[in-house]
C-alpha cells in the first residue's frame, strides 16, 4: 500500500528533526551571512530610530505655540531660528520659534511636532543667517515625528533564532550597528549517485550509458537551499563498493542522499547496500518519484531518491526542501499560487502527480513535456511544478491548479 | 506632475538596455555558474535519451511476436534470453524471445516494445542462466519505450542565451555531457550611500546619527540578483567629495546606484553633485520611494534612490530588479499572487502604495508596520510587498490585493 505524499513528507521531517539541535554555529560578517540562518535571538542593542526625528522637510515647532487662543486666528507667526544640522544634535528650541528641519534630522529638545514646508507661509526656507518669520497652522503634538523606538526598542528581540537572513534582515542588523552575526553551520549532505549506466560528464559516452545529471541537479538545488554538499562521484552497481563509499563519509555527514537503486528491479544497489540498516524502501503515491528510501545509515539520516533526474528534483522539492524549511526555518517554502491549465491533462488514479510547467503572464500555466521522469530538457524549460492531487484523474484546459514556483 | 510607477520602470529599463550588449563573457564550471546567465545558445551535442531505452522493469520484445493470429489467444509464450545488462549495449533480440530489461536500459536491436513485469506470467524474472519461457500479452509497438531524442535531438537548441542557470538548467547541461558553460560576467554596480547623518555599523554612534543600513540591504539584494557590487562606503553631504568618489569608480562600473540626497530638501548632495550631468530628478507617484534620480553620470547609467531603507528596497524591487529581468533575463520576476488583506489600510490619493507584509498560510496577508519608510525592523519581519494601485485610497479587511513574494 503506497503512502501519501503528506505522510512521506512528515516522515522526512521526523527523520531530519535531529538536525535542529546540532548546535554548531559560526560568526560571519553580515554579507557572508546572506542566505544563512540565524543561530541565536538578536536583541536590539539600541532603539530604532535611536532618537525622535522628522518625517518631513519642514519646521520643528512647539505645538503649544500654534494652539488657537480665544479670538486669535488658527496658527501663529513664529521666528525662524538656525536650521537643524543633518546628523547632529540640535540646540533646544526656544518658545515662539521654528527651526527648519530635514527628513531624518533629530528633533530639537522642546519641539514636539513638524509642519511640512508646503504648509508654511512662505513655503520656502529663508536663507540661513537672515532674520525671518514664518506663519504656520495649528498642529497636533507628535505630527510628522518619528518617535525614538517606534520601529523597535532597545532590548527587544530584533530577529529570532532560525530566521533566514536576506536583504531586509541584514539591513536591520546593520541599522542596529552590527557587522557580524552568529549563524548555523550549514547542514552537510553526502550526495551519491549510483548506477552502472551513468558516467561523469566530460568523459566519453560508451554505448548504452548516459551522463549523470542527478549529481549536478541535486547539488545545485541543495546549494540554493543553504546546504553544504559533498559529492562522491558515481558509485557502481556493486553494493560492497557503495557500502565502502558510504562508510568512508558517513561520520562527517549530517544527511546522506542517494539517487537510483531504490525501485523493485533485479539490481537495486541502494536497496542491497542498505540491508541490515534501519532503512525502509517505500512506495509513495506520487508520479514521478514513487519509490523512496528513508531511514538511517550507521545512525546518519538517509534518503534514497529514485534514479531519473525529474524524479530527483521532484523528490527534493516535495520532501527534502519542505522538511528543511519546517525543521530549520530555511529555505523558505516555494511560493504556491493558483493558475489555470493551458491544456488538459490526465493523472493516474491514486497518485499525486507533479507536472512541470511554465507560468505565463496572466496566470495560465503551460505543461512542459510529458509525464516521463527522464525529460530533463523539458524540466530545464520549466519554472513551476503543477500539483495534481491524488484522486484527480483528468483536468480540462482552464482548470484551476496549484503551482509551486521554482 | 508625478510620473507613474509603470512609466518610471520603463525609463529604468530603457536606461539599462545598453547592458544587454556588453558582450563580456566567461567560462565557468557548471556549479560555479549556478545563478548566472547563459551567454550563448547551447546546441545539444547529443540526443536525449541518447538511445531508445526501457521505461519499465519488464521484458523487451518484438511486438509482432505478440500479435494475435486468427484462432489464437491474445499474446504468446516467448523464450526468455539473457537479461539486458544495465549500462551496456545488448545483443540483438532474436524472434520469439523476450529479454529481461530494467528501467533506463538500452533496447536491444530488433525489440520495439516493453511488457512490464507485472503483466508477465509468471510475474517474476527467471534466475539468470536457467531456461525459461514467459507468457506475455499483445502489445503495441513503442509501448514503454523512450525513443532516442524524445527529450531533445542532437543539434537542437537546448538552452537559449539569456537563460538563468538553476538546478534544472545545470542538470540538463550535465546530461548533455558538459562540465563548463559560457556565462555573462555580472553587471558591476557601484553602490554609494550618502548623508552626514549616517555612520558605518561597528563604529560608535554620535548623537543625531544613525547606522547605514542601505548599503548592506542593497548590496544583499543586488548579490541575490546576480550583480557584482562595489561599495564605496558612506559619502558625506559635500557634493565635491561625492563627485570625486564617483569619478574615481565610474569608468569601471556598468551602473551607479546612490541612496539619499534626491528629494526637495535644502541639502540634497546627490542632486548637487549631478548638476551638469544628464540626470533627471523626478517624482514617482509611489509611496514610499517617490523621489528618484535617473540618467547617466559621465556616460554611466545612474539611479538615485531615496535615503530611507524601506524606500531603497522598494525602489530596487519596483524598478531595478524588474528592469534587470527584462533586459538581461535574470533575475526572475518576483512571484506575484493574490491575497486577502488581514486588516484595512488607507493609501494616499494619486499614489501607488507599496506596503510590507507577511503572507500567512491560507492566503491572507498581514501588514508589517505602518507606512513609514524608516521601519526597517518591520521590513525584516516581512516576506511580501503588498501592491495598492494608484487610485485606491481605502481597502477593507478581506480585500483582494496583489502581493509580490520577497
Image (cartoon, coloured by chain):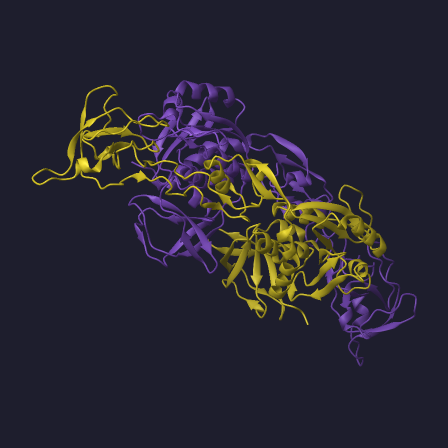
Chain colours: A yellow, B purple
Whether residue B154 can be seen here: no
The number of discs equals: 0
Give percent across and percent down for residue B73. 79, 79
Specify whether A377 is left or right of A362: right
Say above or below: B165 vs A10. Answer: above
Whether residue B344 can be seen here: yes
Say above or below: A195 vs B210. Answer: below
Give percent across and percent down for residue A358. 55, 52
Question: Residue placed farthest to the front in the image?
Answer: A155
Return the residue nearer the eye: A336 or B369.
B369
Specify whether B315 is left or right of A124: right
Specify whether B90 is left or right of A309: right
Say above or below: B311 vs A304. Answer: above
Return the residue nearer the eye: B26 or A275.
A275
Q: Residue at x 68, y 53 (%)?
A: B151
Return the residue nearer the eye: A114 or B314.
A114
Specify whether B126 is left or right of B307: right
Q: Residue at x 85, y 55 (%)?
A: A240
Give percent across and percent down for residue B212. 45, 32
Question: Residue placed farthest to the left in the image?
Answer: A71
- The picture quadrant where one finds residue B236 is top left
- The picture quadrant where one finds residue A103 is top left
Where's the N terminus of chain A, which quadrant? bottom right
Give percent across and percent down for residue A357. 57, 55
Amino acid at each position: 500500500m503506497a503512502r501519501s505524499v503528506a505522510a512521506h513528507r512528515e516522515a522526512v521531517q521526523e527523520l531530519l528533526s535531529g538536525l535542529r539541535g546540532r548546535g554548531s554555529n559560526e560568526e560571519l560578517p553580515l554579507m557572508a551571512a546572506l542566505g544563512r540562518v540565524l543561530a541565536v535571538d538578536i536583541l536590539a542593542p539600541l532603539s530604532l530610530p535611536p532618537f525622535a526625528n522628522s518625517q518631513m522637510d519642514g519646521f520643528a515647532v512647539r505645538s503649544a505655540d500654534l494652539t488657537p487662543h480665544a479670538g486669535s486666528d488658527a496658527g501663529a507667526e513664529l521666528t525662524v531660528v538656525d536650521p537643524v544640522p543633518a546628523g547632529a544634535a540640535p540646540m533646544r528650541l526656544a518658545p515662539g520659534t521654528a527651526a527648519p528641519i530635514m527628513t531624518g534630522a533629530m528633533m530639537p529638545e522642546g519641539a514636539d511636532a513638524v509642519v511640512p514646508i508646503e504648509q508654511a507661509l512662505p513655503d520656502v526656507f529663508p536663507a540661513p543667517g537672515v532674520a525671518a518669520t514664518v506663519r504656520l497652522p495649528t498642529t497636533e503634538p507628535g505630527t510628522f515625528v518619528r518617535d525614538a523606538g517606534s520601529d523597535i526598542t532597545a532590548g527587544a528581540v530584533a530577529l529570532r533564532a532560525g530566521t533566514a537572513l536576506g536583504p531586509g534582515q541584514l539591513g536591520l542588523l546593520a541599522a542596529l550597528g552590527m557587522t557580524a552575526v552568529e549563524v548555523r553551520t550549514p547542514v552537510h549532505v553526502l550526495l551519491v549517485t549510483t548506477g552502472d549506466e551513468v558516467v561523469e560528464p566530460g568523459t566519453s559516452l560508451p554505448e548504452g550509458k548516459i551522463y549523470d545529471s542527478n549529481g549536478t541537479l541535486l547539488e545545485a538545488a541543495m546549494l540554493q537551499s543553504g546546504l553544504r554538499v559533498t559529492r562522491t562521484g558515481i558509485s557502481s552497481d556493486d553494493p560492497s563498493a557503495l557500502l565502502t563509499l558510504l562508510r568512508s563519509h558517513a561520520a562527517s555527514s549530517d544527511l546522506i542522499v542517494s539517487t537510483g537503486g531504490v525501485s523493485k528491479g533485479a539490481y537495486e544497489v541502494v536497496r542491497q547496500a542498505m540491508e541490515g540498516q534501519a532503512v525502509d524502501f517505500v512506495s509513495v503515491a506520487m508520479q514521478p518519484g514513487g519509490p523512496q528510501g528513508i531511514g538511517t545509515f550507521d545512525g546518519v539520516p538517509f534518503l534514497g531518491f529514485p534514479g531519473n533526474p525529474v524524479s530527483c528534483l521532484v523528490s527534493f522539492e516535495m520532501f527534502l526542501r519542505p522538511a528543511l524549511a519546517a525543521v530549520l526555518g530555511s529555505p523558505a517554502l516555494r511560493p504556491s499560487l493558483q493558475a489555470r491549465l493551458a491544456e488538459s491533462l490526465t493523472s493516474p488514479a491514486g497518485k499525486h502527480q507533479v507536472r512541470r510547467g511554465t507560468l505565463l503572464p496572466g496566470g495560465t500555466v503551460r505543461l512542459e513535456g510529458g509525464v516521463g521522469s527522464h525529460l530533463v530538457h523539458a524540466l530545464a524549460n520549466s519554472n513551476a511544478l503543477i500539483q495534481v492531487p491524488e484522486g484527480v484523474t483528468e483536468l480540462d484546459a482552464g482548470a484551476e491548479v496549484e503551482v509551486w514556483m521554482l
